[in-house]
Amino acid sequence: MGKIIAVANQKGGVGKTTTAVNLTACLGARGYKTLLVDVDPQGNSTSGLGINKRGLECSTYDLLVGTAPAEEIRVSTQFANVEILPSNIELAGAEVELVDTENRAMRMKNALIGLKNQYDFILIDCPPSLGIITLNAFAACDTLLIPIQCEYYALEGLSQLIATLRLVKRMYNPNVDIEGILLTMYDARLKLTGQVVAELKKSFPQKIYTTTIPRNVRLSEAPSFGQPVLYYDRASRGSQAYEEFTMEFLRKNHLKEKK
């Protein structure tokens, strides 16, 4: 049975979507059948995998409001072993529509449960907020992967995220846990970086990945070409970092490269 992982941080611009897209691509390239669920109304994961978000007939909006099943929404990509449930701006309306809906926090879990046996991994790219859509993702996932930028405000935001996770654990999903914390836009030359890392290791000693993701131009360019960096420029520092991270991720899940 596949593992569902929510990639989340309510602070924008921390590399959340970059991590979701590139981890998905790297897992697929290593032989793991992977589904990316884009539940960010910006639809950046969708376009990052080369899908035209403006031309969608169905999206994760339909998944959450119940007008289409996941099987009808699912789209194949040009990348090995990678499929996606795409998103577009329509999803922004789901927050309002779900407010008075029965079992509104469990819509995503119920929609994805039938897909777990079809994939090795299902990654959910969450919106940069702690609203009802993110709550759905937390209720549906097995673990939470948190990309975090090495800056002071990131620590403040992380405490809010952990508080929300505890709430979900108590009310909706008692078995959910933290998959790990990934340091993004990492610059070892900055004193603040070392201070943030030290604070994180003190609070989450077993959860910080050894691999860090640097700032990298090719990593920033790849989405505009509709490609994960692995396919855009495999020799780049950004691609090498995500490949290294993927191997660490697999080791922590007691798995090896399939091919």
Image: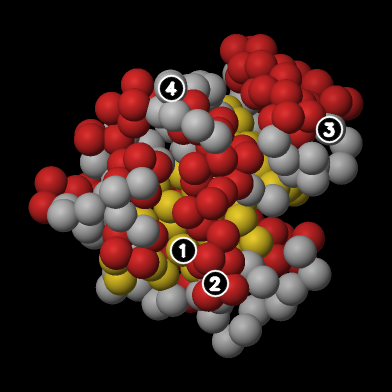
- Which residue is farthest bottom? 259
Q: CA distance from mark 3 to mark 2?
A: 29 Å
- Residue 100: which disc? 4
Q: Nearer the viewer, mark 4 or mark 2?
A: 4
Q: Earlier in the sequence, mark 2 or mark 1?
A: 1
Which residue is painted at 62% across and 17% down in the image? Answer: 157
Residue picked out by circle 1: 35
- Residue 119: which disc? 2
What is the tally of numbered marks visible in this picture? 4
Q: CA distance from mark 4 to mark 2?
A: 32 Å
Q: Nearer the viewer, mark 1 or mark 3?
A: 1
Which residue is painted at 35% across and 40% down in the image? Answer: 65
Residue type highlighted by circle 1:
Leu
Across and down, in percent, residue 115 comes to 51, 67
Q: CA distance from mark 2 to mark 1?
A: 7 Å
Q: Is residue 183 above or below residue 255?
A: above
Residue picked out by circle 3: 204
**Residue 153, picture quadrant:** top right
